[in-house]
Amino acid sequence: MTDTLRYTPVEDIPKIRHELGLAFNSGRTRSIAYRKQQLSRLFYLVEDNQERIRQAIFSDLGRPRHEVDFLEISGTLLEIRDAYDNVEKWAAPQKSPFSLLWFTLSPATRKEPKGVVLIISPFNYPYFLTLTPLAAAIAAGNAAMLKPSELCPASASLLAELIPKYLDPELVRVVNGGVPETTKILELRFNHILYTGNNRVAQIICTAAAKHLTPVTLELGGKSPCVVDPKCNVKIATKRIWWGRLVNCGQVCLCPDYILVPESFQDEFVEALKDAYNELHPTDPKTSGMLGRIVNERHVERLQNLLDNTKGTIVFGGEIDKEARYVAPTLIRDVKADDSLMSEEIFGPLLPVVPVKDLDEAITFINSVDEALSVYIFTSDSKFKNKVIDNTRSGTAAANDTILHVMGPSYMHAKWIQSSLCS
């Protein structure tokens, strides 16, 4: 497994885009049989190379094997299979609602592939967030250019090797590189752009897309609070919060980002968090093989800066080994709204506890910052749960668990992405 990524020559990128357009214009992606064949081959790309995928992700992120299987491989296979099973239904013309004026003309909406789709994927899920959008693009009958994250060189190299072996090399191409290569890509016209990542890069992509009036689908991050009812099942709540915070070493956009607890309950809940952590990690996570690593030294420095400037109290953790890209799971209490830990999405194994007066103040706190990506509510009281959901805005919400809600059938990536890739 190599950690050296071979970049695509910048001068070759316009040619690749042109060739993808010619291949799409050949019309072969219009065939449902062709789309299903490509989806089948995409499925076997993952199925046949599971061990190599595990090794690549371990090289890039130090992610434990069980996390790769659960969060990356199985999820990707499930999404591709769902696309394969439903491509006929998704591609079928949609009949218009009955109208006395028009029913004799049988009006319907015909779903047409858009053309060449650009998929720019992030480092934290190098396969799931590259291949599930690709499955959607294939199901919708498009050609695709893939730009994996250069921060995961082993995974990006493996994708560049496997894609042309399994898929039609004229209709799916991988372009690897950093800022210069991505800048060149964004100078070109695409029929749709799919991007998963941070807000700063999203602004650059949207600016470039606007020059060509290219539609864009963005999946961005945000801070996701946990709201804790003192009457909840504390043992279950603390375990599930820690699991959500530490999976992929906290490098998941939907990780619980901070905990809101009543001031009078903070001491008890912090002790329960300590007990839950010790049960989940009875040995040093630096050597146990149960915790991944931060993607690169720059992000380690960023997390170090957040910890160095926090006004909260570190309960445990705080150890950082920059060379090993290791940041210890760290619990911080008495965190305030103006703390460094609240200034950005943490994207690491740091867990702040923010004391508030009561539920009303917790709701006010959530609404005072940028819209949450997800809100997690830990309670057995339906009124408590509904009050939080009814009075806050977030992309998703879940009660008594973290992250797992996005694995349900209503959140299938390929299903909702493909609908934007037809005109």
Image (cartoon, rainbow, N blue to C red):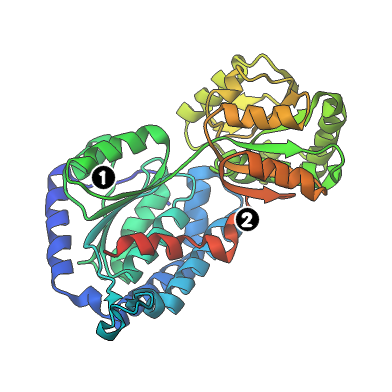
Question: For the residue labelled by badge 1, is the local secondary structure a helix, a strand or a loop?
Answer: loop
- Across and down, in percent, residue 405 comes to 63, 55
Q: Residue at x 85, y 42 (%)?
A: 234
Residue tagged 2? 405
- Mark earlier in primary sequence (1, 2): 1
- Across and down, in percent, residue 122 comes to 42, 45
Q: Nearer the viewer, residue 389 or 305?
A: 389
Q: Residue at x 20, y 46 (%)?
A: 213
Q: Amino acid at mark 1?
A: Tyr
In the displayed orientation, state which residue is furthest to the front. Answer: 100
Q: For residue 291, say whether it is visible.
A: no
- Across and down, in percent, residue 318 comes to 67, 24
Split into 4 quadrants, where in the image is the C terminus? bottom left
Q: Is residue 52 left or right of residue 238?
A: left
Q: Is residue 94 left or right of residue 347?
A: left
- Across and down, in percent, residue 59 comes to 49, 46
In the rendered image of this protein, does residue 19 appear above or below residue 121?
Answer: below
Q: Nearer the viewer, residue 7 or 271?
A: 271
Image quadrant of residue 36? Answer: bottom left
Question: For the residue labelled by badge 2, is the local secondary structure a helix, a strand or a loop?
Answer: helix
Residue tagged 1? 7
Q: Is residue 292 left or right of residue 34?
A: right
Q: Residue at x 22, y 41 (%)?
A: 210
Crowd around label 2: few <14 · some 14–19 · many ≥20 (10 Å): some
Crowd around label 1: few <14 · some 14–19 · many ≥20 (10 Å): some
In the rendered image of this protein, does residue 15 appear above or below residue 269?
Answer: below
What count of labels does the image hold? Answer: 2
Q: Amino acid at mark 2?
A: His
Q: For residue 55, say whether it is visible.
A: yes
Q: Is residue 220 left or right of residue 213?
A: right
Image quadrant of residue 19? Answer: bottom left
